[in-house]
Amino acid sequence: MEKKNKNKVEDLKKKLADVTGSAEKREIDTHRLRILDDIFTLKCPRCKLAFLDFEGCSALTCAGCSCGFCSYCLEDCGEDAHEHLRGGCAQEGGPMYCEHADWLVYQRRRKAR
C-alpha cells in the first residue's frame, strides 16, 4: 500500500512537470499533489521532515529537529513522546510498542479518514 501511494505521488509529479494545459489545470494539479503528499507521507509535526522507518517504538524523534512525536497521531510532544504513549495513544489507540505490520494497520486507518 505504501509503495502504491508513493508511486501515485511520483506519477503525479511527473505529470505536473509535463503539463501544458491551462493555468487553472496546473493549479488544480499542484493542489492535488500537495494533498497527496500531505496525506500519504508521514512527517515531523514541527519541521515537516518525512520519516519512513519504524522500528517498534511509537515514540519517534525527528532526525532534523529532535522533535519527539507520536507515530500514530503525529502530536508534537516536545523532546520526548514516551509519556504521551504511556497506556497507548489516547487519540488513535495505538500501543507504545508494536510490530511494523500492526503499526501499518493504524497508519492505513489514519490515511483513510
Image: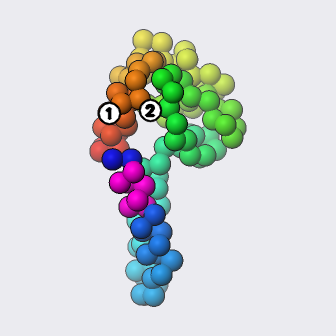
Tell me where residue 42 appears, x and y as whole percent: 49, 43
Q: Which residue is mark 2?
A: 73
Q: Which residue is mark 1?
A: 105
Answer with the quarter of the image where residue 90 lies: top left
Element assignment for label 1: helix
Q: Is residue 4 magenta?
A: yes
Q: Earlier in the sequence, mark 1 or mark 2?
A: 2
- Identify the amino acid type marked 2: Cys
Q: Are marks 1 and 2 in contact (CB under 8 Å)?
A: no
Locate the C terminus by quadrant: top left
Q: For the magenta stretch, what is the residue range?
A: 3-9
Q: Is residue 81 above or below residue 52?
A: above
Q: Is residue 38 above or below residue 29?
A: above
Q: Is residue 55 magenta?
A: no
Answer with the quarter of the image where residue 108 lies: top left
Answer with the quarter of the image where residue 61 lies: top right
**Viewer-proximal residue among 64 and 5:** 5
- Residue in the image at 36% along x and 30% along y: 101
Q: Is residue 73 left or right of residue 46?
A: left
Q: Main secondary structure of the magenta part?
A: helix
Tell me where residue 55 appears, x and y as whole percent: 51, 27
- Identify the amino acid type marked 1: Val
